[in-house]
Image (cartoon, rainbow, N blue to C red):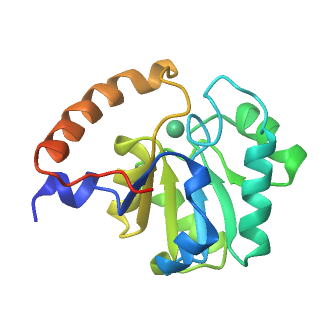
Amino acid sequence: MNLLKKYFLPTSYVENIKAITPERLKNMGVNTVMTDLDNTLVAFDEPDADNEVVEWFSNLKENGINVMILSNGKSGRVGTFCEPNGFQYICSARKPLSKNFRRAVKEMNADIENTVMVGDQLMTDIFGANRVNMKSILVIPVKDKDGLATILNRRMERMIMRYFNKRGLLSKED
Ligand SMILES: [Mg+2]
């Protein structure tokens, strides 16, 4: 297995969080979700959660699936988003470093094997998950614009995506 596959290929690839249903997660053997915030749940420049996001969280919880936000964003941005809704979170997570992936799993009383990372970026969300052998789901970014810190990552990501696409390794599921 080559290194690009090992580190950057997600377990699954879907359009957006709406496709990430309790059924899909149960089929993957997952009872805990770590999710990125910016361009995964809402656009990177949207301060608040919308109804869709709030419903996604409550639907998962009603089905016995715990959810936590694992974001590289600063405490102001992430706290403003999470606290009104009671979302658990870790901010300034420094993905793809492993430390906060492990800390998040611990805080959720979960096991890495039963946890999935949901995110829109190969270089942070998927790479970080793969480094600790966590399952991962890649989503299409909510907005095709990013914050400054992400621009270089996107350039590398496009190259890796092209590699996967050419080999038929990454196809979007319904
Ligand atoms: Mg993101």
Residue 118 placement (x, y as % from top left): 51, 55
**Residue 57's quadrant in the figure?**
bottom right
Q: Could you tell whether 17 is left or right of 135 in the image?
A: right
Q: Quadrant of residue 50?
A: top right
x and y percent of residue 16 in the render?
Answer: 54, 46
Note whether 9 is above or below 161 in the view shown.
Answer: below
Image-based side of 7 in relation to 137, left or right: left
Instruction: Name, please, the residue furthest toward the front.
Output: 174
Residue at screen point 11% across, 43% down: 166
Q: Is residue 8 left or right of residue 168?
A: right
In the image, residue 51 sits, relative to residue 47, either above or below, namely below
User: Percent from the top left, x then y, of residue 110?
Assistant: 60, 78
Q: Is residue 133 above or below residue 86?
A: below
Q: Residue 133 at what x, y percent from top left? A: 35, 70
Tally the numbered discs. Answer: 0
Picture quarter with the N terminus: bottom left
Residue drawn at x 28%, y 25% as measured from the top left: 155
Q: Quadrant of the C terminus?
A: bottom left
Residue at (48% x, 46% y) in the render: 15
Q: Nearer the viewer, residue 69 or 59?
A: 59
Q: Which is nearer the eye, 4 or 13?
A: 13
| Residue, far right | 84
